[in-house]
Amino acid sequence: MKSYSRISEIRSDLEAGTVSCARLVEYYLENIHQNEDLNAFLEVWADEAKTRAAEIDQKIKAGSAGKLAGVVIALKDNLAYKNHKVSNSSKILEGFESLYTATAVQRLLDEDAILIGRTNCDEFAMGASNENSAYGPVKNAIDPTRVPGGSSGGSAVAVAAGMCHIALGSDTGGSIRQPAAFNGIFGLKPTYGRISRWGLLAYASSFDQIGPMAHSLEDIATVTEIMSGKDDQDASMMQLDPLPAWSYKPVSKARFAVMKQAIENPGLDSDVKSKFEELLNKLVNAGHEITYFDFPLLDQMVPVYYVLTTAEASSNLSRYSGMLYGYRSSNATDLESTYVKSRSEGFGPEVKRRIMLGTFVLSSEQYEEYYEKAQKVRRVIQDATVQVLQSADAILIPTTSTPAFKLGEKSKDPVAMYLADLFTVQANLAGNPAISLPLLKNSDSLPIGVQLMTKFGEEERLFDLSRLIESLNS
Ligand code: GLN
């Protein structure tokens, strides 16, 4: 079967009768089967997907199908889907089934999307390599000796290897963009408060956003538009103008701001640097403006991110006590040992490290020194980001400083792993939308992502500028 990169192509073939939802589902199930060793899925809803495909085929015949008819979607294993398991790739949620459906997921269902399964991720979305899953690592879709990135690694690989058309991920510090970059697909972290977090299992609530991973910019825009907008269940939604259906508005002269500290960073891989600079030259040759800005705060971003996210995580994860739901230790004898043993046995090492770090920075002796200070620096980073974007349309940097690294390469060194987030956390600290575009490759043909960030709430502009860069690069 032809491999589709756009929802619009699927739609026209469905309407012409050259493909059916049933056939599409069969195709993805076959690819899932053939790629089992990549470990992208924790559960595949094969029978349900087939039943739903048959129903939607009927709707297409009747002319009543929604915008996502025939679009097969996978969910990161931290999104609630009523009566389906959700585990956050953690033993602590073993056996747990969602009691309701996440708003973002419901909006896709309302447009006749077909859900095919839940994808593996780093436990509680904490990680940059997908090696922190209780269900084993995911392997990169392009080179299986390498990591897929994290934490939405299963979602990225599922899309890249043709196991679904689109996947949802969540991005707290780069978890959509970094795995998208490592697997050569598109990934968007929307503006904070654009998409409801209701039904997204919380990691760090003031950072988390749900977003799509796809083969094309059009599809990213379509799915974002469908998922976004007011939801009374999420009090942190922002008052943003609703996103209209996106169509490209040509940009004749764009101003891109490139962070000096990113480009001159000693950790920046030489291929990533040279390919990125070639892209900048193309932009200049096409009449666009590149300015280099100084951002001495770059080195503060990862520490601030980790102080604040671990603090929020330590609070969010206190609900997993062995009492209410999920895993309960069979070795417990009383209330206290139920808490201690269930949590000690149920959480993996990275999650425990972060709960301890978060508890430490929130403790009364450390609060001012770490948590409060980090909040202040977050504000400074937000203000500095706003300022850069006053004189530029977008900030342009590579999504990551290296292409996908080898499995096991950083798993023993948490600090090296945390530094994999160097270029992505700014968008989460500031709340701005940012996208990773799969435009470059290194000399070994490994994908390199290009990251664009626009002003708060400016997804449409982000898509226009992305299209501009994409067309120059092709
Ligand atoms: N790698 C980052 C972390 O471990 C990002 C995770 C995410 O965005 N969920 O926190």
Image: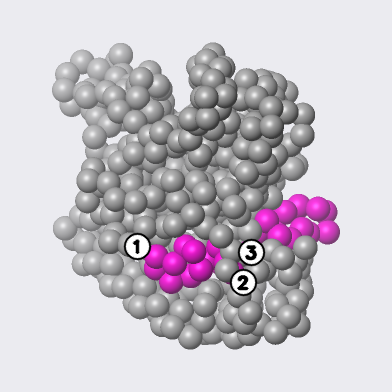
Task: Examine the image and state in which quarter residue 103 appears.
Answer: top left
- Quadrant of image for the C terminus: bottom right
Residue 87 in the image, given as x and y percentages of width and height = 41, 28
Residue on which the image places disc 2: 250
- Please give the range of residues in magenta: 438-465
Circles 3 and 2 in contact, beta carbons < 8 Å: no
In this picture, residue 333 sits left or right of residue 406: left
**Quick one: label 1, few (<14), some, or many (20+) residues within 10 Å?**
few
In this picture, residue 247 sits left or right of residue 449: left
Residue on which the image places disc 1: 241
Residue at figure coordinates x 57%, y 68% from the top left: 249
Residue on which the image places disc 3: 467
Residue at mark 2 to residue at mark 1: CA–CA distance:
21 Å
Residue 392 can be seen in this image: yes
Marks 3, 2: nearer the viewer: 2
Residue at figure coordinates x 47%, y 62% from the top left: 459
- Quadrant of image for the N terminus: top right
